[in-house]
Amino acid sequence: MDNSYDISFTNTFSSLTSEELVNKAKNRLSDFRYTHCVRTAKTSVDLAKHYGLDVERAKVAGFLHDYAKEIPVEEYVRVIKEEGFDQDLLNWNRGIWHGVVGVYFIEKELDVHDEQILNAIRNHTTGSPNMAELDKVIFLADFIEPGRKFAGVEDARSQTALSLDDGVGFELRHTLTYLIEDQAKVYPKTLASYNVYGVKQSN
């Protein structure tokens, strides 16, 4: 891994040091996923600075957003069944779980309990109809980080630079189009988010 993927934290929002936090993430993640998390953290910092938000919270949330992405399915199923989660989650998959349920592992393994950070991670894949500004930053940083190459990513970056809400609306429209074309299920919270951020506002 080259030096562009070095990262450290002034405040980890945890009892762990910066080095401990980074090492635990490296041990949980493939190189591919880890480097994506570093790029997302750096994009989150850029967006937080642009919009006058808490840079350190954005950096930690961006870095940890996919911490639980590669946890085995059977471990997720166990946690959903035993730890008080909505049992409807069993009808979904890691694409949904790694945000909604992933915060369980972040609290347990990394001792991060900051609700702003945890909520941003919970919502980074599904969106939410009432997203905080930090939620929007992580949602968008994951979508537009420099490793993303999908058709329309430059439009997404332009919209995000103009307004977080515009960026969120663009991402939700893009996501729903992809899911519908793939004839895939749409998570209810994502559809509810689209109805707030993705539709044209009438005057």
Image (cartoon, helix red, strand yellow):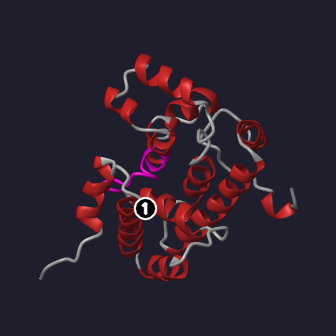
Q: Which residues are magenta?
A: 117-131
Q: Is residue 203 above or below residue 76?
A: below
Residue indicated by mark 1:
136
Residue lying at 59% horizontally and 38% vertically, measured from the top left: 68
Name the image quarter holding residue 45.
bottom right
Q: Is residue 9 visible to us here?
A: no
Residue 31 at x, y percent in the picture: 77, 49
Q: Is residue 115 above or below residue 145?
A: above
Outermost residue to the top:
82
Residue 98 at x, y percent in the picture: 52, 41
Q: Residue 144 versus residue 8: which sits nearer the camera?
A: 144
Q: Secondary structure at mark 1?
A: helix
Residue 9 at x, y percent in the picture: 70, 51
Q: For label 1, count other residues whose C-alpha is less than 10 Å away and answer few (under 14), some (14-19) or many (20+).
A: many
Is residue 196 left or right of 159 when viewed as pictured? Answer: left
Q: What amino acid does circle 1 point to?
A: Lys
127 drawn magenta: yes
Q: Which image quarter is the C terminus in?
A: bottom left
Residue lying at 50% horizontally and 79% vertically, measured from the top left: 152
Residue lying at 67% horizontally and 67% vertically, measured from the top left: 147
Residue 32 at x, y percent in the picture: 73, 53
Residue lying at 55% horizontally and 53% vertically, measured from the top left: 57
Q: Is residue 149 above or below residue 96?
A: below
27 drawn magenta: no
Outermost residue to the right:
2
